[in-house]
Image (tube, rainbow, N blue to C red):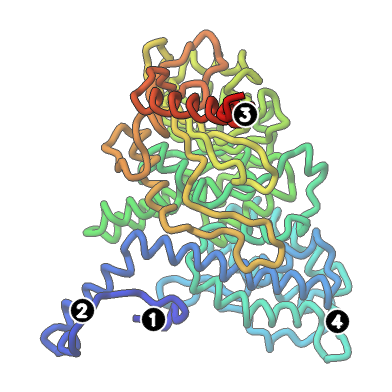
């Protein structure tokens, strides 16, 4: 079966000997089977991988166009794309528009003050922000950031085509990117933009600030490891483009939809609360902060509590626009590895402001094997390490060995507390770094199942031995809370040194082969 929405991705419904399944008496059953297949976890996983590849291909083409034909500076491109997309999709309330999309034909290349094509796009963005009930202070921040790119440049001057460059760009985005955005299920839009070519944003001292994006399937995994649900209060102290908050938000909304499916009004209230009260992120770099805000807006309005401050020295633990503590019970993080303790200092500081809950950090794993000993010991005084997961070496573009550490917050780690150590080097994905590849990520067929099993191991649930066996690729062991340097799986692999019969047989065979080889070379077999 193929659908109008996804014509290039057939869905296998079942095998039928004849066409009787199309009989009127069987249609109810058939439609239910189709609905079940479309919501099947494996089908949703296949669709998400396809959607990301599809969007990446469009963004790569768009990036090339902006570079080759329009000469847009890297620092301007992502703002042009984000603003144009926001203006092109409008804001819906049910089936009706609260703010109608800006049609390309309305951009006529006027050079009148406050009526240029850039002004019209900016005005539409401003209306969309108001309709989405974004705080006024944040509306001003966004429009001020976009104004320099959309208005104060030469993109509004008519070219030989009779259109301004910004109008031509807008039409391309409206015709090509807008349909993909509306039909794909991608939960990290500006993150995809940034990944396509990270030079789209001029990050000051980017190497030192470690602007590294965590893949969507990893942010989702970490949110699940922390048992995020509709009542979670989630924060990220080094936000980047907001990938962790978006994954958490999607899980929270899905949980609310399931639990409140019989009360639409209660669900709407909970949806608003999740987006506006239960998510918070802190980002230091102004450009990245602005992209995170745009990302959250495009993914569902969850931008109310994104803070542009230094997590370690300025942030006091409050909501963005009110003097009230954010009562976080879930902490998700990919820290800048150049910070103290490879970035583990962020974990220590955030946990000091939490009373209970779960936390997960993906970090260069030298932090847990001696690079951050004192910070590790400090963390364990009030928090328990419950899981350590060694990730694939090629997870990020830079070959950095990382691990995910999972914590239970507010409980001192005791010397006899057990930790799940998992070797997840093979996560079921094959990766490439080819610049012109349509997709640099390929599911070899087991990725989705493997990620689910990791969650089951950490939660102490029954595990499928097809992928993970205790004593082979995952281990249960204790750490020394007073050491702070024994957090990684390789330090807890149990190697059985008891010789087996096969060991004996192989040793004897090897020795006999060596003796025969020695005799042949010496010539003794000839009686010399």
Mark 1 vs 3, N-terminal side: 1
Mark 3 vs 4, N-terminal side: 4
Distance between mark 1 and mark 4 Cα atoms: 44 Å
Q: Residue at x 19, y 88 (%)?
A: 22
Q: Is residue 159 visible?
A: yes
Residue 413: x %, y % from top left: 43, 15
Q: Residue at x 69, y 24 (%)?
A: 340
Closer mark to the observer between disc 3 and disc 4: 3
Instruction: Say which of 82 and 401 sits in front.
Output: 401
Distance between mark 2 and mark 3 Cα atoms: 80 Å
Mark 2 vs 3, N-terminal side: 2
Callout 2: SS: helix
Instruction: Say which of 289 and 411 sits in front.
Output: 411
Q: Which residue is mark 2?
A: 30
Q: Which residue is mark 4?
A: 111
Relative side of 137 to 286, left or right: left
Residue 523's disc number: 3
Distance between mark 1 and mark 3 Cα atoms: 77 Å
Relative side of 76 to 10, left or right: right
Mark 1 vs 4, N-terminal side: 1
- The crowding category of the residue bearing disc 3, from other C-alpha atoms within 10 Å (few below 14, some 14 to 19, many at least 20), is few
Distance between mark 3 and mark 4 Cα atoms: 99 Å
Q: Which residue is mark 1?
A: 3
Disc 1 + disc 4, Cβ < 8 Å: no
Distance between mark 4 and mark 2 Cα atoms: 58 Å
The C terminus, quarter of image = top right
Residue 112: x %, y % from top left: 84, 81
Question: Dividing the picture into quarters, in which one does residue 262 lie?
Answer: bottom left
Mark 4 vs 2, N-terminal side: 2
Q: Residue at x 41, y 10 (%)?
A: 415
């Amino acid at each position: 079966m193929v659908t109008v929405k996804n014509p290039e991705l057939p869905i296998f419904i079942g095998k039928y000997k004849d066409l009787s399944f199309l009989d009127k008496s069987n249609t109810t059953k058939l439609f239910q089977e189709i609905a079940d297949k479309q919501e099947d976890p494996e089908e949703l996983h296949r669709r998400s991988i396809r959607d990301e590849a599809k969007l990446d291909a469009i963004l790569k083409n768009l990036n090339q166009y902006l570079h080759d034909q329009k000469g847009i500076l890297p620092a301007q491109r992502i703002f042009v794309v984000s603003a144009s997309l926001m203006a092109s999709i409008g804001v819906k309330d049910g089936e009706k528009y609260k703010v109608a999309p800006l049609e390309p034909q309305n951009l006529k290349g006027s050079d009148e003050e406050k009526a240029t094509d850039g002004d019209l796009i900016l005005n539409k963005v401003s209306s969309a922000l108001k309709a989405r009930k974004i705080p006024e202070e944040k509306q001003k921040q966004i429009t001020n950031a976009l104004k320099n790119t959309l208005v104060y440049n030469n993109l509004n001057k008519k070219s030989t085509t009779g259109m301004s460059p910004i109008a031509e760009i807008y039409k391309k985005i409206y015709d090509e990117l807008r349909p993909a955005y509306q039909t794909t299920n991608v939960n990290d839009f500006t993150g995809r933009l940034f990944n396509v070519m990270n030079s789209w944003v001029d990050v000051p001292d980017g190497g030192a600030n470690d602007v590294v994006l965590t893949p969507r399937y990893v942010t989702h995994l970490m949110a699940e490891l922390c048992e995020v649900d509709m009542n979670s209060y989630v924060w990220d102290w080094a936000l980047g483009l907001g990938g962790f908050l978006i994954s958490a938000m999607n899980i929270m909304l899905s949980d609310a939809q399931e639990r409140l499916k019989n009360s639409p009004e209660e669900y709407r209230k909970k949806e608003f609360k999740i987006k506006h009260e239960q998510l918070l992120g802190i980002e230091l770099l102004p450009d990245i902060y602005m992209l995170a805000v745009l990302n959250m807006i495009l993914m569902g309005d969850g931008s109310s509590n994104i803070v542009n401050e230094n997590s370690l020295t300025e942030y006091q633990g409050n909501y963005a626009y009110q003097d009230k503590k954010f009562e976080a019970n879930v902490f998700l993080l990919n820290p800048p590895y150049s910070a103290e303790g490879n970035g583990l200092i962020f974990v220590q500081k955030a946990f000091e402001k939490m009373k209970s809950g779960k936390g997960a950090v993906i970090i260069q794993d030298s932090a847990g094997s001696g690079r951050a000993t004192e910070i590790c010991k400090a963390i364990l005084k009030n928090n328990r390490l419950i899981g350590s997961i060694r990730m694939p070496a090629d997870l990020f573009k830079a070959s950095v060995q990382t691990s995910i550490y999972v914590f239970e917050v507010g409980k001192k780690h005791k010397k006899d507390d057990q930790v799940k150590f998992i070797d997840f080097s093979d996560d079921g994905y094959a990766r490439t770094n080819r610049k012109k590849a349509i997709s640099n990520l390929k599911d070899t067929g087991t990725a989705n199942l493997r990620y689910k099993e990791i969650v089951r191991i950490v939660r102490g649930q029954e595990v499928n031995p097809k992928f993970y066996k205790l004593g082979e690729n995952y281990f249960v062991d204790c750490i020394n809370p007073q050491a702070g340097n024994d957090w990684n799986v390789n330090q807890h692999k149990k190697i059985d040194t008891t010789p087996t019969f096969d060991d004996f047989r192989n040793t004897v065979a090897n020795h006999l082969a060596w003796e025969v080889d020695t005799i042949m070379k010496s010539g003794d077999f000839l009686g010399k």
